[in-house]
Structures are given as structure tokens and as C-alpha cells.
Image (cartoon, rainbow, N blue to C red):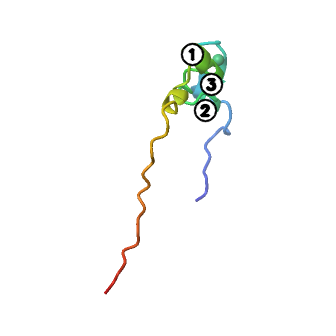
Amino acid sequence: MSGAIGPGSEGMNLEHIKTCVRCGLRYDWRRSSSTSLKMTYCSHLCEAGDLGFTLEALLHAEPPAKTEVEASEPETAAI
Ligand SMILES: [Zn+2]
């Protein structure tokens, strides 16, 4: 597997440049620290500041339900 990289190294690609709707900063959305709205906010701070919360926080706001871990038990071949 040879990673054939096209022309232009991996760097600032204008296609990835977004403008933060909160602070107006131009940023590479791939590097945004925003958790859920990388393409909207430059960072989670802006996300949280604009929304008043983060979606991530919402998602984790509920107490973690008892996670059912499907333990795949090996079939006991009692033959
Ligand atoms: Zn911002």
C-alpha cells in the first residue's frame, strides 16, 4: 500500500477552510476542536459559547445507561 499523494502536500486546503460563525476566524475544519460542529465553529469554545452548551455535553448529559456488553460466549461444544 503505497500512499500515492497527489500534487500538493497535505496542508492548508482551501476546500477545508471554514469561517467560524461565532468569531469569524478562518480555520481548517479538520483541525477544529469542536466536537460535533467542526464545520461551523473553529473550536469547542465557540461551539459552547454560541450554543450555550455543546452537543457533546448533551449527549453525555444523561447518566450512562447500563451498557449491555454482549459477551459472545464461545459455544461449549459438549459433544
Ligand atoms: Zn470561533
Instruction: Tell me the CA gap for discs 2 and 1.
Output: 22 Å
- The residue that label 2 is drawn on is 30
Looking at the image, is 11 positioned above or below residue 4? above
View quadrant of ligand 1: top right
**Rendered location of residue 22, percent (x, y):** 61, 12
Instruction: Name the secondary structure under disc 1.
Output: loop
User: Closer to the observer: label 1 or label 3?
Assistant: 1
Q: The disc labelled 2 sits on which kind of residue?
A: Arg
Asked whether the residues under the numbered discs 2 and 1 touch, taking CB atoms below 8 Å apart as contact, a structural biologist would say: no
Q: Give whichever of 21, 16 is nearer the camera.
A: 21
- The residue that label 3 is drawn on is 44
Where residue 28 is drawn, which disc sits there? none
The reply to whether residue 19 is visible in this rendering is no
Task: Give me the residue at 61% from left, 15% from top.
Answer: 49
Task: Give me the residue at 61% from left, 57% from top.
Answer: 2
Q: The disc labelled 3 sits on which kind of residue?
A: His
Where residue 52 is drawn, which disc sits there? 1
- Quarter occupied by residue 34: top right
Q: N-terminal of the two: label 1 or label 3?
A: 3
Looking at the image, is 70 positioned above or below residue 17? below
Instruction: Name the secondary structure under disc 2.
Output: helix
Mark 2: few/some/many CA within 10 Å (<14, 14-19, 20+): few
Asked whether the residues under the numbered discs 1 and 3 touch, taking CB atoms below 8 Å apart as contact, a structural biologist would say: no
Q: Is residue 54 left or right of residue 10?
A: left
User: Closer to the observer: label 3 or label 2?
Assistant: 3
Looking at the image, which residue sits at the far left?
Answer: 79
Q: The disc labelled 1 sits on which kind of residue?
A: Gly
**Which quadrant would the N terminus be assigned to in this image?**
bottom right
**Rendered location of residue 25, percent (x, y):** 66, 16
Instruction: Tell me the CA gap for discs 3 and 2.
Output: 13 Å
Task: Give me the residue at 54% from left, 30% from top.
Answer: 56
The reply to whether residue 57 is visible in this rendering is yes
